[in-house]
Image: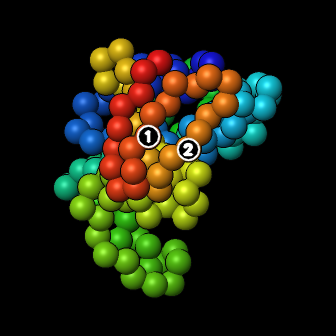
C-alpha cells in the first residue's frame, strides 16, 4: 500500500471540495509499482489533486492549494492542486491553443493525455470511487479495482 497516497485520501476530504479526485501518475504509478514488486511510492514525482469549483478566481485556487498542502505537509510529497473549471483560462498561454471549458472534474480527467494516467480516486465510505473515463486499467497482484466502460466513473472495494 502507498501510505502517503492513503493518508492523502483520508485527509483531503477535510477541504470540503464538492468534486475532487487524487489522480494521474500517483495512482497509476502506485498500481504499476505494486504489480511489479517495487516500493509502492517509487518513481512518483507528484500527487495531483484536481477539483471543480465554479469560483474561477486564481486567489481561490491558491487558497485551496495552500490548505491542501498544509494538510499533507508531513508526508513530504509534491502536491499539485488544480481547479479544473479554470484550466481553459490558462491553457492557451501554456500550450498555445484554446480548449473548451470542462463541465466537471470527470470531464477533465477524460481529456488527460495518456489513458493509463487518466484516473482519479477519492474515498466514498469504505470504498474508493474511481474515475477512469479512458477505460479499464487492470492492476496486478489481486488489486480489487473495477472499472466501467469509457466515459463513466465507478467504485472499487479496498
Depth order, front residue of 127/82: 127
Which residue is tagged 2? Answer: 137
Q: Secondary structure at mark 1?
A: loop
- Name above or below for residue 42 compared with residue 50: above
* Quadrant of the rendered image containing residue 64: top left
Q: Quadrant of residue 150?
A: bottom left
Q: Residue furthest top?
A: 126
Rounded to the nearest whole Å, what is the CA distance between mark 1 and mark 2?
A: 7 Å
Please tell me which residue is depicted at 52% across the width and 24% down the height of the picture.
144
Q: Can residue 42 be seen by looking at this rendering?
A: yes
Other residues around mark 1 within 10 Å, as few (<14) / some (14–19) / many (≥20): many
Task: Name the colouring of the figure.
Answer: rainbow
Circles 1 and 2 in contact, beta carbons < 8 Å = yes
Q: Which quarter of the figure has residue 139?
A: top right
Q: Judge whether 85 appears above or below 43 on screen.
A: below
> Pointer 1: what residue?
147
Q: Earlier in the sequence, mark 1 or mark 2?
A: 2
Q: Residue furthest bottom?
A: 97
The secondary element bearing badge 2 is classed as loop
- Number of residues whose C-alpha sits closer than 10 Å to that of mark 2, classed few (under 14), some (14–19) or many (20 or more): some
Nearer to the camera, 64 or 122: 122
Amino acid at each position: 500500500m502507498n501510505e502517503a497516497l492513503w493518508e492523502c485520501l483520508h485527509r483531503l476530504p477535510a477541504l470540503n471540495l464538492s468534486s475532487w479526485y487524487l489522480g494521474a501518475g500517483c495512482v497509476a504509478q502506485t498500481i504499476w509499482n505494486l504489480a511489479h514488486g517495487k516500493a509502492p511510492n517509487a518513481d512518483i514525482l507528484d500527487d495531483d489533486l484536481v477539483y471543480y469549483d465554479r469560483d474561477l478566481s486564481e486567489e481561490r485556487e491558491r487558497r485551496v492549494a495552500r490548505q491542501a498542502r498544509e494538510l499533507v505537509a508531513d508526508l513530504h510529497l509534491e502536491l499539485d492542486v488544480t481547479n479544473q473549471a479554470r484550466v481553459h483560462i490558462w491553457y492557451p498561454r501554456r500550450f498555445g491553443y484554446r480548449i473548451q471549458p470542462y463541465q466537471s472534474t470527470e470531464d477533465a480527467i477524460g481529456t488527460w493525455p495518456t489513458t493509463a494516467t487518466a484516473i482519479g480516486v477519492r474515498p466514498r465510505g469504505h470504498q474508493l470511487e474511481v474515475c477512469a473515463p479512458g477505460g479499464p486499467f487492470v492492476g496486478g497482484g489481486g488489486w480489487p479495482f473495477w472499472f466501467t466502460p469509457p466515459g463513466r466513473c465507478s467504485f472499487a472495494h479496498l
